[in-house]
Image (cartoon, grey):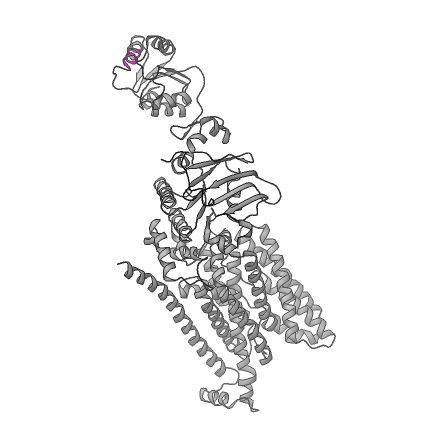
Amino acid sequence: MMGPDRTYDTSRPAALELDGVSVGHGRHALVRHISFALASGEVMALIGPNGSGKTTILKTIAGQLAPLAGTIALGGRDLRTLPAATRARRLAALFTARPRTELLSCKDVVDAGRYPYTGRLGILSEADEACVRAAMEATGTWELRNRDFAHMSDGQRQRALIARSLSQDPDVLILDEPTSYLDIQAQLDMLRLLRERARARGMAVLCSLHEIDLASKAADRVICVHDGTASAAAAPDEAFTAARIEALYGLREAAYLPAFGSFEMDRREGAPRVFVIAGGTAGVDTFRALQRADIPFATGVLSPDDADGMLARSLAARAIFSEPFEPVGREQVERAREVLGRCEALICCVERFGTVNAANEGLLEFAKAHGIPCYRSAAHYLAHR
Amino acid sequence: MGRTEAHRTARTVDARAARAMVVCAALVAALALLALMSLCIGSASIELPDIWRLIAAGPASSTESCIIWDIRLPRIVTSILLGGALSLSGMLLQTFFNNPIADPFVLGISSGARFTVALTMIVVLGANGIMGPWMSVAAALTGSLATMALVLLIARRVRTQSMLIVAGVMVGYICSAATNFLIAFADDQSIVNLQNWSQGSFSGSRWSDAVLIAVFVVAALGVVLALSKPLGAYQLEETYARSVGVNVLALRLAIVLISSLLSACVVAFAGPVSFVGIAAPHIAKLLCGTSRPLLVTPACFLTGAVFCCGCDLIARTLFSPVELSVSAVTAVFGAPIVIALMLKRKGMR
């Protein structure tokens, strides 16, 4: 994994550099003062809610829209002075609009990527053919080359369109939501391919992504676009703190867990009705099931840093934690018993009690002694309620 | 291994080019056959050996020679050129609107041109002037460009493909109503001319017209072939075309001008001819098995030519001596193709 300190060759101009750029349709600026430099071989992701202007930024960089202010330089040359044909050899762009073709094969579509290199009539040379084939093999579309593009699945089409962009052999690749239409395996394959191309060929990639977890896995740096501003580019672990993500997406009734890269629905507040004994990852399913059933619950005694502990912090109405890496203490057990005594049921997700959570076994005994019904899982509890 | 694979790729590309060439050769043969039949069959039947003799001898003053040289040959040449023109115009408009059932007739462009030509005709003939071919073309071009501008304005507002077609048909109806209004109030002399022409017919074609048509149509065909590379990129979505360096604005302007000019030519010399612009490009694409512009454009032109030449032969001979309007015949063959296209694309937005 590349850290934020990764250094790039600074003797050459950045593959793409934005300086004080404002973008928008017509005169109204949607996002202002965007400045960043994208180095060769770097993968950068734009993150932000719908309508924040990610696509507008990408369209401006791709020359589809004129910048309202500032300069965009491609390999050190101002985009405005760059002829369209030269730009097309350096920069490929793929937006979310999908071509509706008729009687065109998959390879016909990929062939089009060689547009900036072919002659007057667009006939492909042997070198062009080799380039197209390499791009199709890299995306796993070579086997589909004779299929009618209109009859392929969304995922196959997306891969073919990525192949088209790769066959354009660009220094900078712009992708708008490249993982939409793809299933999870294909999303991961796609991002692996982009990273591999970036590393092996020095291609710079700038993409907008909906999925924060994918961005944190695939991007060297990310830019958050929000409320008409673009943040400075930062490594994902710096940019994706819970507070920033929650502010970025204006999250209400939901929370972001950086360690999992996941979003959780907000907790059900109120007096706990169920007490859950969990630990490790044993309680994750139960917590989520109770959350879906809209039942406020308490849990304990949990280690604060394992999966159950982190999830309980977002989902449990009341959670009792032990000290990190310490066995459960007597005082914490007392508090847990007090809460448990007011609950109508106990769910014990843990099957084995060891030295660290021995005290939790005492909670189970306590419940049995006081006639509180005990269940194995949320499903078990919900079925017998 | 790598080399054989590379060869195979090269072969598949060649195979498609070869298929397009075979299709074109077959279409040329069909065209020659139809042309010969059109020379032979008619109110005066002429035997094949006589045809060779008459053509070889050049224009002469005998009745048969006049029929061949002054009536049938120019009519055949005109129907071939205008059929190709309609097909090209349809292909361009389908690419422009990314809509398989766009053509100058459906979008009302032919009807717009027909209105301006009728208007010009009545004004000029009313002033005892003579309506030259240039004047007809100019009038038709004015009308088709004006209607095109109107359709484009509507197209900016409507987002669905079917609404665009409905809008085009409505524009067509308005223009037709206006033309019929003109005809109703025109004096007798003009009506004879107007009635014939306004239904769509290749009758009365002259060599002078044919030469003028040939100049326009061949030039347009050349430009379309030269534009096949950007047209191919444009087929794959406008934003994409722009991103690979196509000057989309210039390309769109060229498409509008050429398709308007082609349909203006047709209307000026034959009146509005329906459905060829939809049916012929579609048949050509199916025959060639591709829609790559460079491969399909020549076949597209030839299919339109065959379609019109054949339909004119039927229109002329089916109920001889009564002559049908060519639009009646093209509609019989063309409309089912349009319906089939609409059914195939029922998900059309």
Residue A169, image x and y in percent? 41, 52
Please state which of residues A338 and A314 is positioned toward the viewer in this rendering.
A314
**Residue at (48%, 79%) from the top-left corner?**
B35
The location of residue B138, given as percent across then percent down, is 65, 69
Answer yes or no: is residue B252 visible. yes
When the figure is inspected, residue A290 is found, relative to residue A237, above or below; the finding is: above
Say if residue A249 shows up in the picture.
Answer: no
Quadrant showing the N terminus of chain B: bottom left
Residue B66 in magenta stretch: no
Q: How many marks?
A: 0
Res. B33 image quadrant: bottom left
Question: Which residue in the rendered view is the most extreme toward the right?
Answer: B127
Q: Nearer the viewer, residue B274 or A222?
A: A222
Residue A145 drawn above or below residue A272: below
The relative height of residue A299 versus residue B341 in the rendered view (above or below) is above
Q: Position of residue A384 (x, y in %)?
A: 33, 20
Query: What is the x, y in percent for residue B175?
Result: 64, 62
The residue nearer to you, when weighing A148 against B102, is A148
The part of the chain drawn in magenta is A352-363
